[in-house]
C-alpha cells in the first residue's frame, strides 16, 4: 500500500512539474496592443504605413524569451502618408497585388524564431521568415521589458524584398529603371506585446 502511494505521489509530482514548465513559458501575443509599421523607399520618395499581427506566441522561461512564432495579416496593409483617399487606395491596392505581395494568394506572412541570444535587455533573434510562400533566414535585434504579466518586445527588421520574389521596380530583376526604381530593402518597426 505504501509503495503504491509513493508511486502515485511521485507520478503526480512529476506531472505537475512538467505541466508547470510548459505553461510557464507560453505567452500569447496580444494583437490589439501590438503594432507593426512598414517603411519603403524609392528613388523619388518614400512611403510608410502599418500592418496587423494576426496571431503569435512567445516562449518565455525565467523571464527570458527562448523562441516564438508571429503571423502577419498581409491583407491588412495600410498607408499613412498619402492624404488623398484615391491615391492612397491605389498604392495600397498595388501593394496587395501580384506586383508586390499577392495577398489573395498569400494572405499571411510568418516568422518562426530558431535561435535567440540575450545581452542585458537586448536580444538578437534569428528566424525563418516566410513571405509569398518563400522562406528565408533573417536576423534582427530587439529590446524586451516586462510589464506585470506581459512581455513587450520592440525592434526593427530590415527585409530584402527581392529574396521573396517581390519584383516590381526592383533593380535585382530589371535594368534601366531610372527614377522608377524602388529599393529592395524595406523596414519593419514593431512592438509586440505578449501575455501569459
Image (cartoon, rainbow, N blue to C red):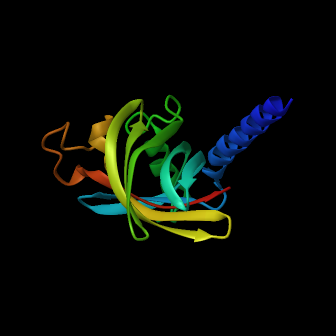
* Point 64% across, 62% down: residue: 33
* Point 41% across, 37% down: residue: 131
The answer to whether one can see residue 82 in this image is: no
For residue 95, what is the image quadrant?
Answer: top left
Quarter of the picture containing the C terminus is: bottom right
Q: Nearer the viewer, residue 80 or 165?
A: 165
For residue 44, what is the image quadrant?
Answer: bottom left
Residue 100, x across and y down, in percent: 39, 40
* Point 56% across, 50% down: residue: 58
Residue 124, x across and y down, in percent: 36, 58
The answer to whether one can see residue 22 in this image is: yes
In this picture, is 151 found above or below 138?
A: below
* Point 59% across, 47% down: residue: 57
Q: Nearer the viewer, residue 177 or 150?
A: 150
Residue 31, x across and y down, in percent: 63, 54
Q: In the image, 98: left or right of 177?
A: right
Q: In the image, 146: left or right of 188?
A: right
Furthest residue toward front: 2
Quarter of the picture containing the N terminus is: top right
Q: In the image, 23: left or right of 133?
A: right
Residue 149, x across and y down, in percent: 68, 64
Furthest residue toward left: 176
In this picture, is 190 found above or below 1?
A: below
Q: Nearer the viewer, residue 121 or 179?
A: 121
Amino acid at each position: 500500500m505504501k509503495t503504491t502511494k509513493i508511486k502515485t505521489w511521485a507520478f503526480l509530482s512529476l506531472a505537475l512539474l512538467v505541466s508547470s514548465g510548459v505553461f510557464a513559458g507560453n505567452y500569447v501575443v496580444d494583437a490589439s496592443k501590438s503594432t507593426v509599421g512598414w517603411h519603403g523607399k524609392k528613388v523619388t520618395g518614400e512611403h510608410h504605413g502599418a500592418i496587423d499581427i494576426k496571431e503569435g506566441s512567445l516562449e518565455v522561461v525565467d523571464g527570458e524569451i527562448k523562441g516564438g512564432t508571429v503571423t502577419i495579416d498581409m491583407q491588412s496593409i495600410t498607408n499613412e502618408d498619402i492624404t488623398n483617399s484615391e491615391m492612397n487606395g491605389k498604392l495600397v491596392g498595388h501593394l496587395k497585388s501580384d506586383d508586390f505581395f499577392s495577398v489573395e494568394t498569400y494572405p499571411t506572412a510568418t516568422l518562426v524564431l530558431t535561435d535567440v541570444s540575450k545581452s542585458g535587455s537586448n536580444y538578437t533573434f534569428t528566424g525563418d521568415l516566410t513571405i509569398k510562400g518563400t522562406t528565408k533566414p533573417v536576423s534582427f535585434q530587439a529590446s524586451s521589458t516586462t510589464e506585470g504579466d506581459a512581455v513587450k518586445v520592440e525592434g526593427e527588421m530590415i527585409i530584402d524584398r527581392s529574396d521573396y520574389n517581390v519584383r516590381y521596380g526592383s533593380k535585382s530583376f530589371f535594368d534601366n529603371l531610372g527614377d522608377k526604381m524602388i529599393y529592395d530593402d524595406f523596414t519593419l518597426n514593431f512592438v509586440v506585446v505578449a501575455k501569459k
